[in-house]
Amino acid sequence: MPKGKPIEIWFQDEARIGQKNGIVRQWARRGTRPRQPADQRYENAWLFGAICPARGKAAGLVLPFVGTASMQLDPAPNMPTDLS
């Protein structure tokens, strides 16, 4: 890197949000095992955010799935926001 070239420092965080159904319980007579189908579907979203405090800029992405291609995305040019 050439001398005198400014360096931007960005801080990044990520999170997965969503719901996955837990244990299904039901009342039944002692000694019986009633059938209780459980819903195995689930929905998730991945949130990625970055902030540059020196410039007062922030960026974020909300993605329905994450893979190699999505990890190569740069949120900064996609959604610049002024924090001031």
Image (cartoon, helix red, strand yellow):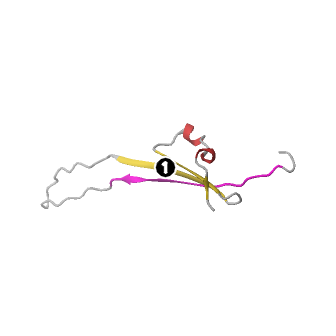
Q: Secondary structure at mark 1?
A: strand
Is 36 situated left or right of 55 in this image?
left
Q: Is residue 72 above or below residue 83?
A: above
Is 1 situated left or right of 24 in this image?
right
Residue to which mark 1 is pinned: 46
Amino acid marked by disc 1: Trp
**Could you say which is closer to the camera, residue 73 or residue 15?**
73
Instruction: Report x, y in % for residue 2.
Output: 85, 45
Is residue 6 inside the magenta stretch?
yes
Range drawn in magenta: 5-21
Quarter occupied by the C terminus? bottom right
Instruction: Report x, y in % for residue 9.
Output: 71, 55
Is 30 situated left or right of 62 in this image?
left
> Quadrant location of residue 25?
bottom left
How many discs mark residues in the rendered view?
Answer: 1
The residue lying furthest to the top in this view is 69
**Could you say which is closer to the camera, residue 30 or residue 8?**
8
Residue pictured at 45% horizontal, 44% vertical: 64
Is residue 68 inside the magenta stretch?
no
Residue pictured at 45% horizontal, 49% vertical: 45
Residue pictured at 14% horizontal, 56% vertical: 32
Quarter occupied by the N terminus? top right
Is 8 situated left or right of 4 in this image?
left
The residue lying furthest to the left in this view is 29
**Could you say which is closer to the camera, residue 27 or residue 3?**
3
Instruction: Report x, y in % for residue 51.
Output: 63, 56
> Quadrant location of residue 81?
bottom right
Q: Residues within 10 Å of mark 1 (few under 14, many from 20)?
A: some
Instruction: Report x, y in % for residue 30.
Output: 14, 61
